[in-house]
Amino acid sequence: MIFAEAERKRFEGPRHRVTHIGLGILIAFVVLAVQLWRLQLIHGFEYRINAERNRLHPQRLTAPRGVILGRNGEILADNRAACDLVLVPAECQDAAAVCDEIEELLDVDAADLRGRIDAAKRRPFEQILVKRDVAKSDLIRVEERAYALHGVYTVVSPQRRYVHGTTAGQILGYLGEIGPDELEQRNDRYSMGDYIGRDGIEQTYEENLRGVDGNTVVTRYAWGQPQLRTDVRGKPYIAKHDTHGHELEEAYRVDPVQGGTVQLTLDIDLQAKLETILVGEVGAIVVIDADTGAVLGMASTPSYDPSVFVTRGSNRERAELLRAGRPNPMVHRAFRETYPPGSVFKVLLACAALEEGLLDEHMTFYCPGFYQIDGAGRKWHCWKRYGHGTIGIVNALAFSCDVFFYNVGRKLGPDLINEYAAKLGLGACTGIDLPREEAGLIPSREWKKEYFKAVYPDQPWEWEWRTGDTLNTSIGQGSVAATPLQTAVLMAAVVNGGYRVRPYLNAALGPQREGPFLSERTVETVRQGLFKCVDKDPPAPTGTGNQAKIPGMTILGKTGSAQVVSLVHHEDYETEEEIPYHQRDHAWFVAGVLDREPRVAISILVEHGHHGSSAAAPFAKEIIEFLYRDQPNPVTLAQRDDHP
Amino acid sequence: MTRTPRDLDILQQHIRVLNPRNTLRVDWAVLLLVLTLAVIGFLCLFSASRSAAASYYQRQIVYFLAGCLVAWLIVCIDHRFLVSLAPVMYGVAVGLLIAVLVSGRVAKGGQRWLSLGPFNLQPSEQTKIILVYMLTWYFTQVKERIHKLPYFMVAIAIAAIPALLILIQPNLGTAACLGPLVFVMLYVAGCRKWHLALMLLLALSVVPLVWIQMTDFDPGLGEDAIKATDANRAFYELRHYQKKRIYTFLHPEYDPRDAGWQTYQSKVTIGSGGLRGKGFCRGTQTYLRYLPEHHNDFIFSLLAEEGGFVAGVALLVLFLLLFWRGLAFAKDCPELSGALLATGAVTILGFHVCINIAITVGLLPVTGIPLPFLSYGGSFYLTTMMCVGVMLNVPIRSTMFD
C-alpha cells in the first residue's frame, strides 16, 4: 500500500528467488533425514552391534593348568607367576630417556627398544614388551627407579614350572604353543597362543590338566587397553584401571576353573636315583609294581629339562634339543626305542614251553657249544664256546644256555612263540598312558612273508619261514625287538604269577591285568631258574646275574646281551675293549623281587654296554637296595593278601 | 506518511541509529527457536562434558550470553547504518586476515588465530558476516546494474579476496562457506542466471583439478616425505592431510583406525542410536571416546546417539523452522538490503548445518565445519548469534513502514 507499483515490481525478482533458496535448503534437509533414516533405522542394528563391540571388551581369563603330583604327593609340575616388563610409550614423559634407563638396569638393547616404540607410533598406548620373565632382583631394581620409569609396567602371566628339572622330564613332557591346524580342530576350548601338552603326561592328560577358561567383559575406552593381572595364586583378573587410567567397569564375569590334579605312581626319589645310576650311559631303567603295573620309576638317558619349552619366543637350548641327533634326549628309551631282547627272551620261551608241556623240569638237552639243524650244516653257537654239557631248564636259565633254547624254540615253533609273546606283553604296545609308545616286534610267518615280499619281490623262496629264523628268534635275536618296558611287563608276569599287567602312571587309572596265562607250576620252575641266575651261593657255580645278588632277598634275574652285529665280527678283535662302541652288544638285565612289598619288576638296558651280567646287573642291585632300604626283613607269602 | 524507501541516505535523512525499543519488536517465534536450540546445545555439551576434564556447557552458556549481547546490539542498531559501514568493516577484516597470515598463532595445522592479549581472535569467522554486509552494501549501490557482467565480476572479486586469504591459512571449511554465500546473495540480488551458471561451471572445474592430484596420491607417506611434498607443491595443489581426508572418504576401508576413524565411528555412533536413542547421558561411543571431537564438529553424532532418529529429525525440523522464518523475513522485506541481509544470515547458518550434518552422517569428507548452537566454541557461537541478530533486525525495519 505504501509502495509505488514500480518499486513493487522491482522486488518481484528477489522474492521468488528467496523461495528457491528455501527449497534448496529443504531438499538438503530431506537428503540428510533420509541418510539418518538409513543409518539409524535400516542399518541401526548393525551399528548397534559395532558400538557394543567397541564398548565391551571380552577378556578370556586363562585357567591355571592342573598340578602334577608324584606318588607321595610331591609337586612335580605347577605354575608360577612370570613377570613381563612392558612399556606404554604415551605414558612416558621422555621415551628415549626411559629406554636408556632400562638399558642401564636390565640387559636390554635401548636402540632396539626405541625402534619398536617408533614402529608403534600410531598406537601410542600399546604395551611394548621390554623383557620377558624378569628376574625378581631385576624387578626390585626397576621398582626402585620407578620415579624415572613412568609408563613401565609389569604384566604377570602364569607359567609352567617343572620343580625337579631334568628328573622325570621326559615322562612329564612339555608344553608348546598350539599350532594353526590343531586350533582349527579344537577351537572350542583353545585360542591362538594357548599352550597345549606336547609330550608325556602333559599330552596324555591334556584334557584333565587344562582348566576351564573364565571370561570377563569390561567396558573399553577408545584409548587404553584393559590389563590382565594375576593374584598370588595365579588366578587372572582385569586390573581396575586400563593402561590409560580409565576406571573399568566389569559387566560380566565367569571365573576360570583350574585344571585337575594328576597324581602319578612315580616315586620321584627312585626316579632321581635311577637317573643318577644311568649318568654317563645311554640307556633306560624301568621299575614297575609287578602286581599292579604301576610305574614306580622309568628313567632314560640322556634326558632333558622341560623348562626350556616354557618361555615364549626363540630359545637356543630348545632349538638344540629339537635338532638333536642320536642319542636323542627327547626319546624315552624305555618305551619309544626297541632293542633285540637277547637272552632276556629266553624267559618267554621257558614259560611257553613249560606251559605247553613241551618241557618239564627234568628234561635235559646236551650243549656241545653249538647247534646244527638236524645234526648237519651251519653251526649255531652258544655264547659259551665249549658248551654247557647236559643241562636242564633251571640251569639253562641260570647260565643262559643258547643251545638249550635252540632246542626249545624248535619244539615250540614261531606260532606258539608269538602266542605267548602276545599273552605276556611283547610284540604289542603295553598300553602305558604316555604318547607314542613303540610296539616292538615278534617275527611270525605272516610278518616275514609280508616284509620280505616288499624287500625281495621276485624271490618267493626268501619269503618262507625257515628253521634258522626260529633259532634266531629263540635267543631274542634276528628281527625280535622289544622295549625295556615290555621286558619289565614280561618279568612282572613271572613275579606276579602269570598275569600280564598294563603299566600306568596316573594313579587314578588303577591296576588292570589279564590272566593268569601261566600255571603255578610253570611260574615256580621259571622262578627257580631266574633265582639261580642271581644266586651265587657256593658250592654251586654262580649264575650270570650274580652281581645283583643281595643276601637274604629273593631276587629273580635274567641277563641279556643283545647283538648289534653278528658274532663273527666280534672275533676280529682280541679283547672286548677294542670293539668300536657302536658294534658293542646292548646290555640287558631284568629282575624281580619276590619277598618285599611291593613286589617289583625291573628292566635295565644299557646301550652298547657289552654284557648284561657286568654292565646292567650291578645297577639292579643298587636299585633294589634303594627300593627296600626301609624293609630289612622279607614279607612272607602269608602277609600278602593279594597273592594270586 | 508516504516515504520513498531510500536505502542509504544517512547524511540526508535523519534516522535513529540506536533504538533499544527495537528489543520489544523482535520476532518471538525466532527467539523461541533460538532459545530451544541453545538449550539443546547446552544439554549435548553437558553430556559431552562427562568424559572430559573441562565442563564445556558452562563455558558455552557464557558464550551464548555474550552472543545474545551482540545480537541485541545488532537488533537495536538500524541495519542501514551497519550496511553503510560495510566497506570499512570489510577493509578491517581483510587487514586482519593478512595480519593472521603474517603473525598468526598456529593451531591444528593452520594459521587461524590472532592473539590479542587474553583473547584469541579468529578473524576468518567474522569475515562471513562482514561479507554479508559488504555484498549487501555493494548490491544496494549497483542495484539493477548487477545484470551486467562487470558488476557481477566485482561481486565475485569482493568475495574472492577474503576467500583466498582464508584458503592460504589454510582453512578450507571457512573458505568453502563463502562460495555458497556469494552465490545465494548474487541470486537473490537479481543477477542473470547464466552468469551464475558460468560461475558454478568455473567452480566445478576445480573437481578435475583435484581429481588429477588424487590419482597418484599415496596415503601411507612418512612424516618427512609429507613435509617435503607439502613444501614442493604447486599453488593449486592441496596439502597432504587434505588429500588424505578426501582419500579416506573415497576409500573408507583404508585404515579405519586412523584417518577413516572419525567418519566410521561417527556413523557407528549415529547408527547405534536407533529410533529413540540410548538416553540422555547414556551414549557409549562418545563417553568412551571412540568419537574424537564429539563436543565440537561431531556433536550431532552425540545428539543422534543419545536421542536417536527422533532427536536428529527434531533438530532438523527446528533448524528448518528457523530458516523458513528467516527467509520469510527476507521475502516480506520491502527493501533489497533487508532481504539480502536475512538471506545471507540464513545461508551462513544453513550452509553450516547442512555440511556439518552431512559430514557426521558420512555423506561428505571430514572438514572442520561446526554446527550452529550445538558445537562448542566461542568464536563460531558469536557468528551464529550475529546471524540471529541480523535475522531479527530485518523485520523490525520493515514493520516501521506500517
Image (spheres, coloured by chain):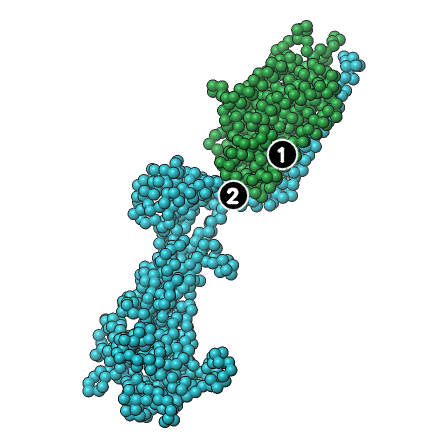
Chain colours: A cyan, B green
Residue A4 in the image: x percent, y percent? Answer: 78, 12
Is label 1 or label 2 in front? 1
Residue reaching furthest to the bottom: A375
Residue wearing tag 2: A55
Residue at the image point whose x is 49% and y is 43% from the top: A219
Residue at the image point whose x is 39% and y is 70% from the top: A336
Q: Quadrant of the N terminus of chain B?
A: top right
User: Is the residue B152 above or below the residue A312 in the image?
Assistant: above
Chain hosting mark 2: A
Q: In the image, is A641 to the left or to the right of A129?
A: left
Residue reaching furthest to the right: A5
Between residues A509 and A490, which one lies in front from this camera angle? A490
Res. B337 image quadrant:
top right
Res. A331 image quadrant:
bottom left
Residue wearing tag 1: B210
Find numbered disc 2 in the image and state the secondary structure of the residue it sits on: helix
- For the question of whether residue B140 can be seen, the reply is yes
Chain hosting mark 1: B
Between residues B395 and B297, which one lies in front from this camera angle? B297
Dot 1 and dot 2 within a common chain: no
Badge 2 amino acid: Arg
Residue A558: mark:
none
Find numbered disc 1 in the image and state the secondary structure of the residue it sits on: helix
Residue B227 in the image: x percent, y percent? Answer: 51, 33
User: Is the residue A276 above or below the residue B105 in the image?
Assistant: below
Disc 2 packing (10 Å; few <14; some 14–19; many ≥20): many
Res. B26 image quadrant:
top right
Q: In the image, is A56 to the left or to the right of A231?
A: right
